[in-house]
Amino acid sequence: MADPPTGTVTFLFTDIEGSTLLWERDARAMRSALARHDEILRSVIEERGGHVFKTVGDAFCAAFPSAPEALGTAIFAQRAIHDEEWEEGATIRVRVALHTGAVDEQGGDYFEQRGDYFGPALNRVARLLSAGHGGQTLLSLATRELVRDALPVDAKLEDLGGRHLKDLFRPERVFQITVPDLPSDFPPLRTLESLSNNLPLQATPLVGREREVGEICERLRQEEIRLLTLTGPGGTGKTRLALQAAADLLEDFQGGVFFVSLAAITDPDLFFTEIAGALDMRESGDAPLEDVLKEYLGRRELLLVLDNVEQILSAVPLVGELLSAAPRLKLLATSRIPLSIYGEHEYAVPPLSVPDPKWLPDLGAISQYEAVRLFIERAGAAKAGFEITSENAPAVAEICVRLDGLPLAIELAAARVKHLSPGAMLGRLGRRLKLLTGERATCPRGKEPSGEL
């Protein structure tokens, strides 16, 4: 097996399209097919210098030291999967995504224990993969630039244009590799443009929170859960977490996923008006808007994200009315406190993970902690060239601990590196958040900086 590459890495992610349906159709045939699928992918990847660092169900995550090697492996794997004589009822179609980016280099001992990578590049390739279809191989712009002059014979790159992936971050220019002996015609990519939603794009990527996003999605996919409320004090990242979970759930709701901000209203009479506005509905005729909205929602399978419900607690009974009127409607709410209505399920949003300043891991592994990763990324945006070093790592870790792993507080602190080193900042913290009073005062009531929720 190849050693795990570090520095700038090309990631190759795969999974099987429609695997759940295949299991339901014929579990015995699927069990045999999956074993063969795993055998093909692992051998193809490892024979060509790739390092398989994670498998989750039918998904493979591999890393390559060079983009051309990763692309060649993807083509070879697609050919092997396509040419395999699968048992009837268990025909495998694999989607593949390639993205190149810098990753956080883990210390040797840590990598041996966890066998994992960290960094925005991994989130990006995962989102790119979710946009594809079985048999399709997608490349990001970063990977395309590295392979464009080293394409295999007869292979071509098709520019699919800029697309907003489900990470709600900047658009990604997507490319598809085509070769003569493999399928090349696929449905439109599964991106924000092709699915009904009004989810607001974000100025910065979400850092960490993979576990929480997965847990929220898993709960909302359960038939019996129709109202899930994310709770926690201000600055814990409830809104951003809800938005990302909603993006991941887009394909689960045929009627769409819609975000409703309640931060700016206090009059319960405006509750239905805000929801109607998010759905782009207008009053018409003599029927009250409330009745029109309930009738509209009652005919659709839809997810509403109700943000900052604590701003208008007097409207909480209306939430129950919506659920009663629309049997296929699901609600994902954010609130500092539970709504305390029948059928509510609560999800307490935890702080970001923080290290123990007394027992810091080595420099390569410290960014395994989400709070530190967030500080590093936002500090790098505030001050070009900022990086974690053996000198400033203890101060950064201590800042994250003193701020209780709260995302908003950490982002505001990271922005201060323009004027203060982490050590100087730590010396001025004193009481928790005292240093951050000035920035926080500039945020409007109920609002938080873009990308810092």
Image (cartoon, helix red, strand yellow):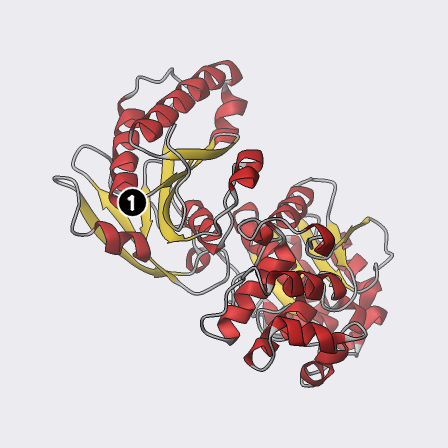
Q: Say left or right for 12 vs 71.
A: right
- From the image, tell me which residue sits under label 1: 66
**Where is 211 relative to 161, above or below?**
above
Q: Amino acid at mark 1?
A: Ser
Task: Name the spot of residue 315 as percent of width and height, x first.
Answer: 81, 69
| Residues packed near mark 1 inside 10 Å, few (<14), some (14 to 19) or many (20 plus) | some
Which image quarter holds the C terminus? Answer: bottom right
Across the whole image, how many numbered discs are drawn on residues?
Answer: 1
Q: Measuring 67% from the left and 82% from the top, which residue is drawn there?
A: 439
Q: Position of residue 328 (x, y in %)?
A: 66, 48
Q: Secondary structure at mark 1?
A: loop
Quadrant holding the N terminus:
top left
Indicate whether 130 appears above or below 297.
above
Q: Nearer the viewer, residue 120 or 131?
A: 120
Position of residue 293 relative to residue 352, above or below, is below
Q: Quadrant of residue 385?
A: bottom left
Q: Could you say which quadrant of the image residue 298 lies in?
A: bottom right
Tell me the quarter of the picture where residue 114 sits: top right
Q: Kindly tell me whether residue 282 is visible in this rendering.
A: yes
Which residue corresponds to the image point at 52% horizontal and 47% vertical from the top-left? 251
155 on left or right of 431: left
Query: Residue 412 appears at what percent x and percent y?
Result: 64, 74
Say which residue appears at 71% left-offset and 48% top-offset.
327
For the question of whether residue 448 can be seen, the reply is no
